[in-house]
Image (cartoon, rainbow, N blue to C red):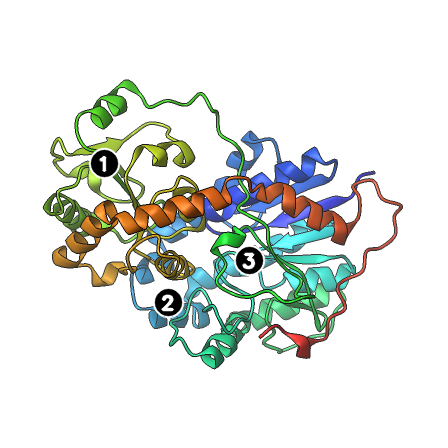
Amino acid sequence: MARRISLLTVGTLGDVEPMVSLGLALKEEGYEVSLAVPEDFQDFVEERGLESRRCGSDFSKFMKDGEMAEVAGRHTLVMMKKWLWPGRDMRALFEGIYRDAVKASADADAILFHPVISVGGEIAEAKRIPGILVGLGSVSPSAEALLSCIPGTGKPAWNRHGYSVLGLQRLAYFSVINEIRSSLGLRRTYRLKHPHYVDGRRVPVLYPVSPVLQLRSNTAGDEIHFTGYWSRQTASAWHPSKRLADFLSAGPRPIYIGFGSMPALGLERSELILRACEAAGQRAIIGNGRGEFHRLPLSDNFYLLDEYAPHDKLFREVAAVVHHGGIGTTHSALRAGRPSFVCPFMLDQKYWGHTVFKLGAGPDLLEIQNWTEEALTERIRDVATNPKYAVRAGEIARAMQHENGAAHAVEIIRGIVGDPFGDGEEPELADVPVKEVVS
């Protein structure tokens, strides 16, 4: 029998899509693969040819109508408070995620888990199987790079020690964590451990991130790998629909504006960014997502996208990309050689906004709670017309063009887990003492 690898993730499409790409690459290599996702993405996973397992209830509904919608676009400290002191619905959601993760990996020979799934370490420890952390944003202690979800000062000590916040996410869930530990034959614990560790040892971390975009140094023995983004090639035959082609040819190259599945944009902010776009003298293709653009009267300067258009192809048709800073959208824009203006809503999006700015591929980020028409107008005009951003984005695209992140990740996983049809020997976890955490 082939080795079975269990992939565990939560979140929205940006958390699921790269795991689908990795799962398919592992399956093609001969591994048995299951991908545990929130129930609203199970059909999505099955339709792409992977075995789907449940990891929590409808996460998209929670983002749209639940407690996360209440804090999206609020100050980072408000978001952190919600994570540390969740309400009843959020607590129930994550307790369900933890329990489902255990069930989904019951037959696994190795697991790869999202950092929010705090019991990933417990599963690997109890089953004595390799556990590999998947890094979305920045989750590895570093003096150079900020933790994705907290504000930074630029001071190395603050950056490095700020990663302890990741251990605090266990604080609100010790009851269910200890229930799970007992069911797995482990002792109860009240340790606020970083997800980097399994049984006191540091585990490998795979980042579906281009090495070109990493802002931290790597040292020998880090067990931290920047593989390139995990994506599947879309159909090369895609072409804009006639309506979209007519819009593209009707004037100067437009920008793209889209915020994915983010909540809290609302009618007022949707209208505000359209006014700013026109004030900046720009045409735009609009990805509606959870915005309210479809409720607004749109001038001929705007095209509301209502058809399938893969980002890796669509972005080559635009001058710049205005987005929320999701890991997938950020990579797609830069691989297309297009500058980005990032308007983060929550979590790792601020990290990607900082990354784009520091790399010189776009203006500084503007969190949505700080939007004004004047500030938006200035940055939209800047990202669309500043030649320095376009040149830098083109340089980054050329550096990224030959990356195959999923294939690179498969080779690393093979080295940790063993060949798909191995000899049955139990792979060993990386034996790295806690005190040797990268700084």
Residue that badge 1 annotates: 254
188 relative to 4, above or below = below
Disc 1 is placed on an element classified as: loop
Residue that badge 3 annotates: 135
Is the N terminus in the top left, top right, bottom left or bottom right quadrant?
A: top right
Of the two numbered discs 1 and 2 on the same chain, state the one appearing first in sequence. 2
Disc 3 is placed on an element classified as: loop
3D distance between C-alphas at marks 3 and 2: 19 Å
Residue 119: % across, % down: 62, 63
Residue 322: % across, % down: 29, 47
Mark 2 residue type = Met
Mark 3 residue type = Gly
Residue that badge 2 annotates: 79
3D distance between C-alphas at marks 1 and 2: 34 Å
Total marks shown come to 3
Question: Could you tell me which residue is drawn at 34 percent across and 70 percent down?
Answer: 78
Residue 204 in the figure: left or right of residue 401: right
Mark 1 residue type = Pro
3D distance between C-alphas at marks 3 and 1: 33 Å
85 relative to 389, above or below = below
Corner quadrant of residue 353: bottom left
